[in-house]
C-alpha cells in the first residue's frame, strides 16, 4: 500500500531541515525550497493508518526525510522493547529515511514509558550495554544509526568517563554514527560546568552524520547556579549559533536540524531559523572550497 | 554510590520520595532541584498529552481541575508504550472511580468517546466495496454473507447524550445536549472522522456484524431490539459510510 516512488528524494543534504509539525504543512509546501529536508519523530507515525501516515507518505515524495526515535530507551538497564523495535522496523522499512537516529538516554522502566530522555552514569559497563542495544537496533533495522548526545541536569557520582569518551566507546564497538546536538552541548556544559568548545574539541566529529540546534530556557539550581533546560520552545540563542559555527569549522558541513517542539511558532519564525543555519552552512562551504 | 533506574523511576513519579543520593551537581552537592527538572518534564509532558487527548473532558471540568485530576492519573497510570497518541486508555475507568468528579456521571463515557475518536483517527486505511459489487450478490446469498467492517469503525452506547456533549463543546454552532441515552457510530471513510447518533437497533445490527454474524443473524439481533427494524436503510448506512471492506 505504501509503495515508494522511484523518483523519491533519499539523501539528507548538508542543508538546514526542520522538525515536522502538522500545523506547518501549508507553509512548507508553499515554498519547499526554504528547507533541505524534514525530520519526523518515529513514534508519531506508528499508528496503523489515517492522516498522519498519509501526510508523511506525501511529504516523503517531496523532501528527504530523517527519522528520529524518541522512545527506544537505548540507555535502559533492561532489554529493549522488542514490540517497539518491530514497530520501528515497519516504519523504517516503508519510509526508507535518509537517516535514523536515537538518544543516549532511557525512558522506559518496568514497562512504564516515562516520556523523557533520562540520563545514565558513564561507565564502561554501561557503554558495553548501550553498545549491545545499538547493535540490536542496527541488526533489526539493517542499517547504521546515529546516537545523540543528551542534555543533562544531574551528575552521577559513579560516572568515571567523559560523555565524549562514552560515545566514542559505543561508536567504536558498534560502528554507529553520532548525532551532535549543539544546543545539548551548550546546555550540558553550562549545567555540568565545563567549556562547550572543549567538548566539541574532544568529540569524534568524523562520526557526526547530523547536527541538531534548538532553544533552551534558563533557570537556577538550589545553589543559585545557572541551570539550562532543553525545552525546544524558542529560538536558538547566539552562543549556540557561535558554537555551531565553531563545530562546522572543524567538522565541515553537516545536515542541520532546527528543533522546535513546544510553544510552536508560526512557520515563518521556524523558516527564519532554518535560513540562518543555511547561511552558516554556506559560509562553511565557501571556506572548504577556498 | 550507584543509582539504579528502578530507584530513579520511582522517585520521578513520587514527589514525596527523596532525590536518589548518588545524583549530584558538578560540585558534588546533592542534585536537589536539578532532579526536579526530570520530574517536571515527565509529569508536564504527560499532562500535555492528556490535554490534547481529552479536550472535551478538559473543557467540562475546567483547566485547573483537569491538571490536578490528570496529575493523579499520570502518576498512577504512566504510559505502557511510547505511542502517546493512544495514551489514556485507563482514563475512563479512572474517572469512574475518581470521587471529586462523581457528580459528572457522564465524564467516563465522554472520555470513552474521545478515546474511540482518536483510535479511529489512527486506524488502518481500507477500501470499501462498492454498492455495485454488493448489488451483484443475490438477496438469498446476501442474507448469509459475513462482512468485514472498516477497522476505523467504533460503536458506543451511553445513558448520556455523549455525542451531543462532545459537539456542544467542540463545535460553536452545536445545539445544547438534551438528556437521554445515545448510541454513537464513529467512522472514517477516508481521513476525516464522521460521528453520528444512530438508533439502538442499528447499533445492535452493526455490533452483531462486527462480531462476525452474517447479515441474517445481525438482522435478527436488530429486530429483537426493534421489531420493525429497517434492513434496507441499515445496508444503505453501511455503504454510505464505506463500512464494508470484505464479504465472505
Image (spheres, coloured by chain):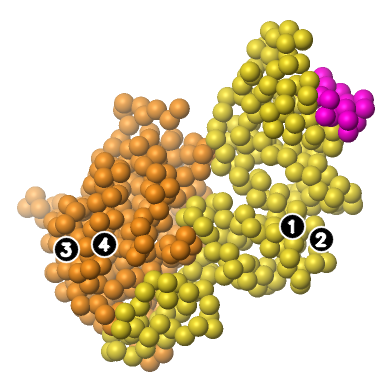
Chain colours: A orange, B yellow
* Residue A30 x %, y %: 44, 40
> Label 4 marks which chain's residue?
A
**What kind of element bears circle 1?**
helix
Q: At 35% from the left edge and 78% from the top edge, which residue is drawn?
A: B3
Whether residue A49 is visible: yes
| Mark 2 or 4: the one toward you | 4
- Give the crowd class for mark 1: few <14, some 14-19, many >=20 residues within 10 Å: many
Q: Mark 2 and mark 4: span between their CA atoms?
A: 49 Å
- Left or right: A268, with A14 as reference point: right
- Give the crowd class for mark 3: few <14, some 14-19, many >=20 residues within 10 Å: some
The reply to whether the C-beta atoms of the residues labelled 2 and 1 are less than 8 Å apart is yes
Q: At 40% from the left edge and 82% from the top edge, which residue is drawn?
A: B20
- Left or right: A243, with B153 as reference point: left
Q: Tell me if residue A36 is in the magenta stretch.
A: no
Picture mark count: 4
Q: Earlier in the sequence, mark 4 or mark 3?
A: 4
Q: Mark 4 and mark 3: span between their CA atoms?
A: 11 Å
* Residue A133 x %, y %: 29, 56
Q: At 29% from the left edge and 89% from the top edge, which residue is drawn?
A: B28
- Left or right: A13, with A287 as reference point: right
Above or below, comparing residue B234 to residue A167 in the picture: above
Q: Mark 2 and mark 3: span between their CA atoms?
A: 57 Å
Tag shown at residue B108: 1
Which residue is tagged 3?
A: A169
> Label 3 marks which chain's residue?
A
Q: Which residues are magenta?
A: B219-235
Which residue is tagged 2?
A: B105
Q: Quadrant of residue B48?
A: bottom right
Q: Tell me if residue B232 is in the magenta stretch.
A: yes
| Mark 1 or 4: the one toward you | 4
Amino acid at each position: 500500500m505504501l509503495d515508494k516512488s522511484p523518483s523519491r528524494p533519499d539523501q539528507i543534504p548538508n542543508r538546514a531541515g526542520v522538525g515536522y509539525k502538522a500545523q506547518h504543512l501549508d507553509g512548507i509546501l508553499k515554498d519547499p525550497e526554504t528547507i533541505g529536508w524534514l525530520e519526523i519523530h518515529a513514534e508519531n507515525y506508528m499508528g496503523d493508518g489515517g492522516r498522519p501516515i498519509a501526510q508523511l507518505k506525501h511529504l516523503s515524495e517531496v523532501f528527504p526525510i530523517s527519522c528520529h526515535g524518541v522512545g527506544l530507551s537505548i540507555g535502559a538497564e533492561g532489554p529493549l522493547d522488542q514490540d517497539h523495535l518491530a514497530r520501528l522496523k515497519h516504519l523504517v522499512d516503508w519510509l526508507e529515511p535518509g537517516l535514523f537516529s536515537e538518544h543516549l538516554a532511557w525512558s522506559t522502566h518496568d514497562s512504564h514509558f516515562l516520556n523523557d530522555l533520562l540520563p545514565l552514569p558513564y561507565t564502561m559497563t554501561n557503554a558495553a550495554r548501550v553498545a549491545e542495544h545499538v547493535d540490536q537496533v542496527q541488526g533489526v533495522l539493517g542499517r547504521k544509526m546515529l546516537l545523540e548526545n543528551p542534555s543533562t541536569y544531574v551528575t552521577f557520582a559513579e560516572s568515571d568517563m567523559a560523555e565524549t569518551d562514552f560515545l566514542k566507546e559505543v561508536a567504536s564497538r558498534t560502528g554507529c554514527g553520532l548525532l551532535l546536538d549543539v544546543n545539548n552541548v551548550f546546555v550540558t556544559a553550562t549545567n555540568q560546568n565545563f567549556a562547550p568548545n572543549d567538548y566539541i574539541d574532544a568529540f569524534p566529529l568524523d562520526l557526526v552524520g547530523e547536527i541538531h540546534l534548538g532553544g533552551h530556557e534558563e533557570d537556577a539550581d538550589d545553589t543559585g547556579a545557572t541551570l539550562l533546560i532543553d525545552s525546544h520552545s524558542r529560538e536558538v540563542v547566539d552562543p549556540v549559533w557561535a558554537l555551531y559555527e565553531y563545530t562546522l569549522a572543524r567538522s565541515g558541513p553537516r545536515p542541520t536540524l532546527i528543533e522546535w517542539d513546544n510553544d510552536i511558532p508560526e512557520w515563518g519564525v521556524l523558516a527564519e531559523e532554518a535560513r540562518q543555519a543555511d547561511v552558516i552552512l554556506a559560509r562553511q562551504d565557501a571556506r572548504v572550497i577556498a | 554510590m550507584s543509582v539504579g533506574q528502578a530507584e530513579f523511576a520511582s522517585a520521578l513519579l513520587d514527589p514525596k520520595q527523596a532525590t536518589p543520593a548518588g545524583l549530584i551537581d558538578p560540585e558534588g552537592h546533592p542534585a536537589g532541584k536539578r532532579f526536579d527538572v526530570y520530574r517536571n518534564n515527565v509529569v508536564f509532558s504527560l499532562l500535555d498529552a492528556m490535554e490534547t487527548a481529552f479536550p472535551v473532558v478538559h473543557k467540562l471540568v475546567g483547566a485547573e481541575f483537569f491538571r490536578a485530576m490528570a496529575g493523579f492519573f499520570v502518576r498512577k497510570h504512566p504510559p505502557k508504550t511510547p505511542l502517546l497518541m493512544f495514551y489514556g486508555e485507563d482514563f475512563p475507568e479512572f474517572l469512574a472511580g475518581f470521587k471529586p468528579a462523581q457528580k459528572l456521571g457522564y465524564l467516563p463515557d465522554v472520555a470513552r468517546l474521545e478515546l474511540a475518536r482518536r483510535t479511529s483517527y489512527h486506524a488502518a486505511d481500507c477500501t470499501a466495496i462498492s454498492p455495485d459489487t454488493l448489488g451483484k450478490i443475490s438477496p438469498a446469498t446476501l442474507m448469509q454473507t459475513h462482512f468485514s467492517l472498516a477497522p476505523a469503525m467504533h460503536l458506543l452506547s451511553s445513558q448520556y447524550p455523549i455525542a451531543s456533549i462532545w459537539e456542544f463543546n467542540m463545535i460553536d454552532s452545536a445545539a445544547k445536549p438534551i438528556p437521554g441515552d445515545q448510541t454513537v457510530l464513529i467512522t472514517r471513510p477516508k481521513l476525516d472522522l464522521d460521528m453520528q447518533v444512530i438508533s439502538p437497533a442499528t447499533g445492535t445490527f452493526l455490533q452483531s456484524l462486527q462480531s462476525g454474524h452474517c447479515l441474517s443473524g445481525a438482522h435478527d439481533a436488530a429486530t429483537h431490539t426493534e421489531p420493525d427494524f429497517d434492513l434496507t436503510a441499515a445496508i444503505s448506512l453501511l455503504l454510505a459510510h464505506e463500512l464494508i471492506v470484505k464479504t465472505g
